[in-house]
Structure formats: C-alpha cells, structure tokens
Amino acid sequence: MSHRTAQLMWVVIALLLGVLVVAQFQTQHLTSKARVSASSADQSVILSSLVEANASLRTEVDTLRVQLSRFQGVGSSGRLEALVEELNRLKIVNGQVEVSGPGIEVRISGPLSALHAQDLVNELRNAGAEAVALNGERLVLWSAIAVDDEGWLMVDGVRVASPYVFEAIGDGETLDTALTRSGGLIAVLEHSYEGLQVEISYRGKLVLPVHRHPPEFHYISLGE
Amino acid sequence: MGARLSDRHRTFSWLLVALVFGLLLSLQINSPPAPAPSADGRDRAGATIRRLEEEQEALKARIGELRQELAVYQQETAATTELLEELSAELNHQKALAGLVAAEGPGVVVTLDDSQRQAIPSGQDPSAYIVHEYDLRDVVNLLWMAGAEGISVNEERVVGTTSIYCVGSTVMVNDTRLSPPYIVRTIGDPNKLEDLMRNPSYLAEVKEKARHNGLTFKFHRATDVRLPAYQGSIALQYAQPGQ
C-alpha cells in the first residue's frame, strides 16, 4: 500500500465519520423535538376549536358594527331599536326573560352526581347551547349545582330529582353529537352508573322559564 | 524495530477507527426513525395555531373597542329622553351581570397548579398529579354557590356561555388556551367565599390531590380583586326572547 493510498483512505474514513456524527445528531434532535410538542390529535382539536371560536368572534364584530351604524345613522327610532335589541340579547344570556327556540331534551333516569350534572351543562355550553334548563330551573352564569346533606341534587337551592331533564336551545345536531360521540359524556355516564337510562330527543321549539334568583351586587364595583 | 512499532501503532489506529465507526453506525441504526414528515406537520399545525391565536387576540381587542364605542352612543342616546334613560340603566345592569364590564372589589383568589413532584410512585395514576378542567369547574361552581358576583380564570372572564374543557392536557376557557398555574379570581363576600372553600364537604377531590400528590391548591382573601371584561362573542342564533 503506497503512502498516498493510505492517506486517501484516512480522508475517506474521516469523511464518513463526520457524516455519521451529523446524522446521529439530527436524529436525536428531531426525536426530542417531537416529544415536547402536543400530539397531532390534540393539535387538530385545538385547531378546529380555534377556527370555530374565531368565526363566532367575527360574527360578534359584525353584530356590534351593525348596532354602531344604527346609532351613527339619523333618526332616533333606529337608536331605540338598537338599545332594545341589545337589552333583549343580554336578558336572554342572563336568564332574565323567558326564551324559546329549537334544541334538544336530554332525559336521564337514574342517579346523577353534582359533578356529572355540571359536566353535562358544560358540554352543552361547549356545543353552543344558548340557554339551558334542568327540570324547569333555568341555568345561568351564576347557577350552582350541588348535592345537599340528604343527597338531593340542588340547582340554585332548589331540589331536583330523577328523571333529570336537561333542555338546551341551540343547534340540535351539534348538541346531540357532542354528548353522544364515542367516549363522550353519555358513554362515560352509562359506564359510571349501572342501569342509567338516557334519552335524547330533538325539539322544534323549547320554551325555557325565567331564572328565579337574580343576583344583587353588593361587593362589585364596575370599571368602564 | 522502529518500523515494527509504527506498524503496530497503525494497526491500533485502524482498530480504534473501526470501533468508533461501528459504534456510531449501530447508534444510528438503533435510533428511532426520525418522524420527519409528521414533525413537519406538527410544526405547520403549531404555526397555524399560533396564527389563529393571534387572530383571536385581535378579534377580542376589536370587540372590546366596539363595545366601548357603542356604550358611548348608548349613553348619549339615553340622555335624550327619560324612557331611554331607564332603558340605558337597565342595559348597563345587564351588561354588568353578563360579565361584559371590567370589575373590582373584595373577594378571594384561588391558585391551582400541577404537582411539582418529579417522581410519581409506580402504580400511581399520573393524571392524579395535574389540575384537570373538572377541578376548575368544581371550584367555579362552588364560588357561585358562595354568592360570587364575578369570576375569572387567568385572563378569561367567566360568562354565561363559558365552557371549561380540555384538549389533551391543555385547559381551554372561552376557547382560549390557558396554562398552569390557574388563578381563579372572584369578587364577593370574602367570609362566605372562604368558608365554603374550607368546608370539607366540597372540592373533596382537589383537596385530596393537594394533600397526597402535591397539587397546589390555595386561596387567600384580597381587598382589591380585579376582573377583566369578557371580550368574546355572545352571538345568539337560535334563542328568541319570549314564547
């Protein structure tokens, strides 16, 4: 073997080594990076909820713009109308008026814990429910569901008993799917309580009552 | 003699090189296959999430501006007649109830955070060491029961349409991603709020996880709790007032 051939071989080996070191480093870099980011399944759920949320934010911007343009236009009747409309919208949200619209009724026969009842209301709201009632008690922002000393389910201090009837105004199909998807809340409930019966029915028109316990502000002072 | 030593030296070098080479080769083969395309996909999804969150941020700011601008007109209009004045007072009251107005007052601040323990004993459920969305729901529900007049979780005001849910280990409130620690601020009677928080009949699961798994769960009263205004949507598509 001549001296020159030997030198060449050394160069080739050094080169190969270098390539391998780099490849090794890159592999480790990629795998560690993949570990820290959220799973792609989670990411796609986050993505779709963001897309939906932004669409609804844009609707809100449009609604507010229309209201503004009414005020900016001439004539006081438009302004009065805009005020009343906004007032009605807020009264619905706050449960201060009777409210009607399409939606679903979820009838649950059997035991139900306060936590599961809260979960169900949360799931309905997450699926876009605009108004919810449980056994004729309208549920609003400040509603609390708890169990009293004797084990009764209480909605804002009022006892409710099985069958528990949740009424929710909103898009029936979206509400239904949110509850009944595989691994969804209804599946969890049926797994948690033996013999629990759940019936979901679509309603063309639900009428939900006024919330009976409007709060009074004693401690809050308002900013602008 | 000199030539033989140099030969032996060379052989040794060759061996060393071969060894390192072999070592690296095997490391390379044993490395889990790099998930190059899906990592790319994740990066792209991550970038889209960030872009959407920026857009969300901008839309919320715009809604805040529009609501303020609108409030000015509403006040001006109200000043013109008595009927409108009444209407406007009612409107302001409903806005405050709905959480559309920033607020301050005395109350209680609750902090929840994942356990900082490094090692989870074998056979234990790791999910018992983190704060779940249902823990937050339980706290919020209890605060309402204690007569809370307003609640926020981190920077999100809790309103009638608020849902608190999770995606994987990410908690979302008002469709906004939150990360721990979760600070639940509430305005109301500090005595009543604290009493119910302490009551052993409530928040049993959270308290249990705090006691045994090192989850952070603490609360203190505060004289000046500040709640941000809700800046999200309250669009109604299906609900109509009255029958």
Image: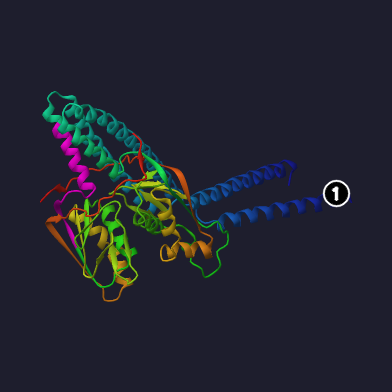
Q: Which residues are magenta?
A: A80-105
Q: Position of residue A37 (x, y in %)?
A: 46, 49
Q: Position of residue A46 (x, y in %)?
A: 36, 49
Q: Residue at x 71, y 42 (%)?
A: A7
Q: Chain of mark 1?
A: B
Q: How would you rate the neighbour count of disc 1 (Cα within 10 Å): few for under 14, some for 14-19, many for 20 or more?
A: few
Query: Is residue A69 something one can see in this rendering?
Result: no
Q: As displayed, is residue A132 above or below residue B150?
A: below
Residue linked to disc 1: B3
- Observer-nearest residue: A159 or B54? A159
Q: Position of residue B180 (x, y in %)?
A: 47, 50
Q: As displayed, is residue A136 above or below residue A36?
A: below
Quadrant hosting residue A204: bottom left
The kind of residue tagged 1 is: Ala
Q: Residue at x 73, y 47 (%)?
A: A1
Query: Is residue A90 something one can see in this rendering?
Result: yes
Q: Residue at x 35, y 70 (%)?
A: A149
Q: Position of residue A10 (x, y in %)?
A: 69, 44
